[in-house]
Image: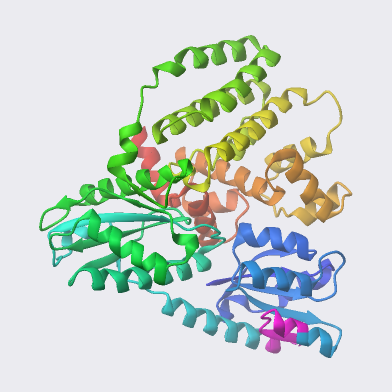
Amino acid sequence: MYGALVVDDEKYIRRSIINRIHWKECGVEVVGEAADGREAFDMIALNQPDIVITDIRMPGTDGLRLSEKIAAEYPHIRIIIISAYNDFDYARKAIRYGVREYLLKPVAEEELETALRRLCAELEADQSSYQVPEISPDSVEKKKFKGDSFLITSFFLSEIRDEACCEERISKLYQALALQAEAEQEGLELFFLREGSGEQCSFLWAGKGMTERKVYLALKKARSEDMEERSASVGLSGVLQGESMKEAQLLKLQSEAVTALKGKIFGGGQVWYFSKVTQKEASLEKYKNDLLQLYELSVQEDWEKLKLLLKEMIIYKLSGAASVLELEFLVGELIFALERISRRLGYLYETRVLFHDLKKSDFLLRFESVEKLASVMEELSDTVLSYRCGGKRYDALEEIRDYVQQHFAEDLSVAHIAGKYHMNAAYLSTVFKERNNISLSAYIEGVRMEKAKKFLRQDWGNITEAALATGYSDSNYFTKVFKKYTGMTPSQWKRSAETSK
């Protein structure tokens, strides 16, 4: 089932399109609606539609400008423009931006449904061209390999915006690596490991007498000839010897490769070896006194000293960390301290949403430098400490956060909330992000996902019931969003919660 986003500044037209079309028969589901191009572009990053249906004339960012931005950043998305203006210049510009269909208002149901089926066929053809040989931890023990040496390389794929973009990049990367792998050593096998985040992918190399050196040479040639520069950062695991492989061994190799890849945050090259990045791991005892003082100041609610200590730890200690272990440890401890502070202030959900990306095991991969990580931590620290001023004056954004937390199970959208609080949707999106370091759409998703995690952990109901209780009418779409947010499917989350009890 492909996802569609409907964009029109007139609500009754949006609802008419959504209600009249036989979406499921076309192989499509509506994943969102937006009142203008700016809101639509924000929702694309959140909802990952495959098709965008947009009006051409809208205030602010119109359909053509939206199409231009989509073509530049999400080239795989198919666009249908609907317009009341039979204007040749508009149609010509639309074609330039990759618009597949240009329909005139009032659009007939059959005409739009035919266009949707045509675009779905194109999307399906594209997806089949991206297929690569795969292997998974639970299938590796059944696999008969040709060689007796194994190694995993993990790549960081920057500028990944959605699943379709990711599949395309992985396919191109695999083709480049496979070509050089075969040239470097006959019989060298290469498999894509379907485990990891959207921005990190891993490949298993298997061959007879394979070494780190041979893989490095293949990577070097692939980079210079075929590999995109955006995929150049790579971490290498150690080499495992043996004629077969267990699931635990595969996961261990992948962990080593990802740990090595995290070393890119320190710069100094584009290939990192696990054996080298682990040599820098140091004792964490030196942070003990600062962390104890941080705890005492939060209990005493000495906000000024607390703010100064946080800044000192972020600017000097975090920025001065020399290893992956130190960075992960410090960020984890700082987040724990800030969540404890926010709990005392009554803003725990806000803080959990703000920090959910930084609590993922591979968060370091998203930062190009330690300085950038420290800058983000400082901004988020200031945001959490600003909550202590809440309630002293009327704050529409604070009220909006409260509204989302209370009405998360309802049909929420930026346009709906903007209308309720008599604000322009584009203005609300901009101001909310500036004040909270997160978009309103992402905040809504974060609140819903935190509630869903709680429901599933408490065995409150099945996945369909959890989806409905958190504002998702389609359990398949809920599962897709949940996996993007947590890295696990709802079923996997439930099992992990049961195991930890």
User: What is the quadrant of the C terminus in the image?
Assistant: top left
- Say if residue 336 shows up in the picture: no
Image position of 411 (left or right of 457): right
* Residue 321, x across and y down, in percent: 47, 29
Residue 111 image position (x, y, % from top left): 70, 89
Residue 429, compared with residue 297, is above or below; it is: below
Report the residue at 58% width, 34% height from top.
374
| Residue 221 position (above or below residue 107) | above
Give x and y (percent) for residue 412.
71, 53
For image coordinates 22% across by 47% down, the residue present is 248
Return the x and y of residue 224 as percentages of the image width and height: 41, 67
Left or right of 374? Residue 408 is right
Residue 2 seen in render: yes
Q: Quadrant of residue 27?
A: bottom right
Residue 458 lies in the magenta stretch: no
In the rendered view, tell whether residue 178 sits above or below residue 425.
Answer: below
Considering depth in this image, is 453 or 138 the residue closer to the camera?
Answer: 138
Q: Observer-nearest residue: 222 or 248?
A: 222
Colour scheme employed for the rendering of this structure: rainbow
In-front residue for pair 466/79? 79
Query: What is the span of residues highlighted in magenta in the rendered image?
Result: 93-112
* Magenta stretch encompasses residue 96: yes
Left or right of residue 310: residue 182: left
Q: Residue furthest left?
A: 243
240 and 8: which one is in front? Answer: 240
**What residue appears at the point 28 percent right and 49 percent down from the top-left corner?**
237
**137 relative position to 207: left or right:** right
> How many marks on residues?
0
For the point 47% across and 57% down, the residue is 198
